[in-house]
Amino acid sequence: MSTDSPERPPETSEPPGAPPPALPLGEPREPQEPVAGDPEPVATPPALPAPAPPGDPVPDGPPPAAEPPAPAQPAPAIDPGEDAFSDNAFRQRGLEREQRLAGFDNRTVIGSVVITDGQGISFGGGPDGGGRHERPGPVDPDRLREDARTYVATRSDPQLRMLLDTLSLVFLTGPASTGRHASAGDALARWSLRTERDPLVAVLHPQSPFGTLTARLRPGHGHVLDATGQMWPATVPDAEVKEVQSWLRQNRASLVVLIDEPNPVTEVRQYQLHHQPAAPERILRAHLRHCLDAPEQDGAVLAAAREDAETRDWLDELTAPAECVELASVLADWWRTGRGAPPAVRQVRHRLLCHQARELLRAAPAVESPTQQAYALAGAVLDRHELNTVIRAAGRLAELLRATENPHGSRGRQVFTDPLHNRTRHIRIVAARSAGPATGGSVRQLVRMKQPRLAGALVDVAWSEFDACRGPLLDWLRELCLDHDTRVRISAAQTLGRLAGIDFAEIKREVLDAWAGSVRPAHHQAAAWLLEKAVKDGARADEARAVLRRWARSGDRLQVLIALRAYGTEIGRDDPQEALRGIREVVLARRWTRGRPGQVLRPDVRWLVSSALAEIYTAGPDQRGEVLSELLAWARRDPAVTPQVTQALMLIALLPADPGGSGADGAPRRPERYDLLSWLADPPDGSAGTVPVEDIVQLWRTALVDAHLFHHAWRFLISWDRSAAPGTPERAYMHDLFARLAADPRLRSRIAFYREFRRHRAAGEGTR
């Protein structure tokens, strides 16, 4: 008995409480072309789990004769993504979308701003303390007096001055970019004024060995030595410390050594003081009052500046004193010039970020390079990922960079003389508890950039200014795009998308064109995310869209698959008209037929078309009618694509009207309402009648008797019915839908059986 004319009532052989059987939605995929050295199997479309609870009757019947199913293949190394629309897949896609959205930042300038800064430290400004940079040597006394007018005292300053008086030598500890230089300069200037007419402060070269300092110190001067990142504070012998202190006392001099070593040797700890930075807002206000003609207007300036989004973001994210100094100068100029345009903060902020990026990527001693740079870039690309993931990725990047620096040998890394904290100064490591039953609430260590926007600047500078880094960086990012963790793949692909904003032609030639010839789904998905990032960042959006249009029309199956995946991202949601045009050309092109009656599109193409349409449908209220009208237009124009249209409708039918979430056991909670049902039952103003009711009913008829869709279609229809509460527009729509479906002789007995079952179930629930 064929499914075209079933006569017997539907039966169910499922025992109560047993999971319902699942049928593959559509034909099994054709085997992909084998690629040498590529072990990843081609994904087979997974079956859709039934949203209806166990025990619901599902109209059954022997499906028509079909080809034997292909042998089961092992699960792919990547998530099914667009190839599954179960409740779990909905949740996974939502998590992926949230992470991708977090990677879009149109407010950050793409491309580094080339500036030249001298090696030195700063008093009251610059990357670490605000103000000006000084080269090694004596600092101009007039400059010290000027910086004292804007200096903001910290809670550690009194103890710093006391230790200088009693010990003459202080190791000031704390993270970089927190104002340690400014605190040291102010304290030393005050110390020297006790015996001298002018403040006498000298800056020592940062690479000066501690044991040779006595030959470089100046009698009667205060000195600053920046040993940030140096390893000697953990190993310096006591004799050298005593020798330097003795010289300082004999020559009425003093020295502040800036370190970030958390565990210096015991000989250093007695001279150690932890720096306590001042609040950024206090520093900003102090410099703003200094720059303004009327200092009491600082509050009014800040209130007015907050009306600009760029400035408001910077105010909320201030961390380093250098930012406060630069922002104060910009706001003061803006206030004096009449405030005709928003403050010009973007270029200034990016210049500071690029300077910090150069500092992190600058040449290191041979034993540290390129490990230091590898950790800096890994932390930038994998911001908000687990610490172990960042460590593994940094190790791999260091191998690639080391091969470039020393191709004929292996300059290894000393295992126990290079602690992790030396490589993670620019990031924070935080603990976060995992959610869900699978993880058991375990605590993970996550990496956070101290300045989130520094991540982009690091990538920009590494690509734009260090040409020898390009090859290893691309190889590394391409490897990460094949990682088992979806979040890592997204971050790597978006980093490549950012690089495309700087040099689109190079990224297309080295990455996109190669992936367009690959049969690996992971490469196709990464290419789609790369193009999505390039479009969202905006600098090369036109070129990225042109590639998509060309690939959608190319006739090359692999390029078409990438284009369809890309149209299923924010690209399609932001410009649904362009996406629908591209998808339409694929659907109506006869080149994708497998030569079987009623089977126009290949399974891989058909799945990506359906999922892309579902993504566009969720973009907003206006897109619902557009997508449905497009589907119905395809069916009317070419009846052969009706199976494609019906499958897309089934996937859209599962979209919830509310986010849903998870139940107490962590499993996805069944949506209380379905978006398409709610939209059809109660159309918003202006959309009534845009989608003919009978056309939707006809698609349901087709799905309910289709050899591949009927099992799932009945379950989805039952889910719709169970979600329609009495007295609601959804209930009235379902009553009309069942009446129209029952008019079809092929469905009449099945509809009658389900209605009878529903009546008995309602009666049983009412007597409990």
Image (tube, rainbow, N blue to C red):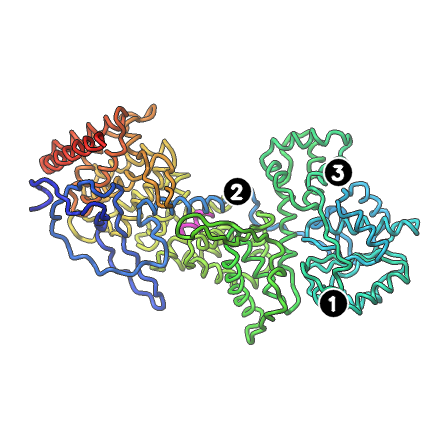
Is disc 1 surrounded by few (<14), some (14 to 19) or many (20+) residues within 10 Å? some
Circle 2 residue = 106
Residue type at mark 3? Answer: Ala
Image: 303 above or below 547:
above
Residue at mark 2 to residue at mark 3: CA–CA distance: 31 Å
Which numbered circle lies on residue 236? 1
| Residue 580 can be seen in this image | no
On-image quarter of the C terminus: top left
Q: Amino acid at mark 1?
A: Val
Task: Give the mark toward the camera: 2 or 3.
Answer: 3
Residue sitting nearer the eye, 402 or 461: 402
Q: Percent from the top left, x then y, of residue 458?
A: 58, 54
Which region of the structure is painted magenta?
A: 527-533
Kind of element beneath mark 3: helix
Residue drawn at x 10%, y 36% is 749
Classed neighbour count for the residue bearing mark 3: other residues with Cα under 10 Å, few (<14), some (14–19), many (≥20): many
Q: Which residue is mark 3?
A: 286
Tell which of 119 and 72 is nearer to you. Answer: 72
Q: Which corner quadrant of the image does residue 364 belong to? A: bottom right
**Which callout, 2 or 3, points at the residue further toward the start of the chain?**
2
First-in-chain label (2 vs 1): 2
Q: Residue furthest front?
A: 768
Considering only order in the chain, which callout, 1 or 3, is on the residue closer to the N terminus?
1
Q: Residue furthest bottom?
A: 408
Q: Which mark is residue 557?
A: none
Q: Is residue 508 above or below residue 637?
A: below
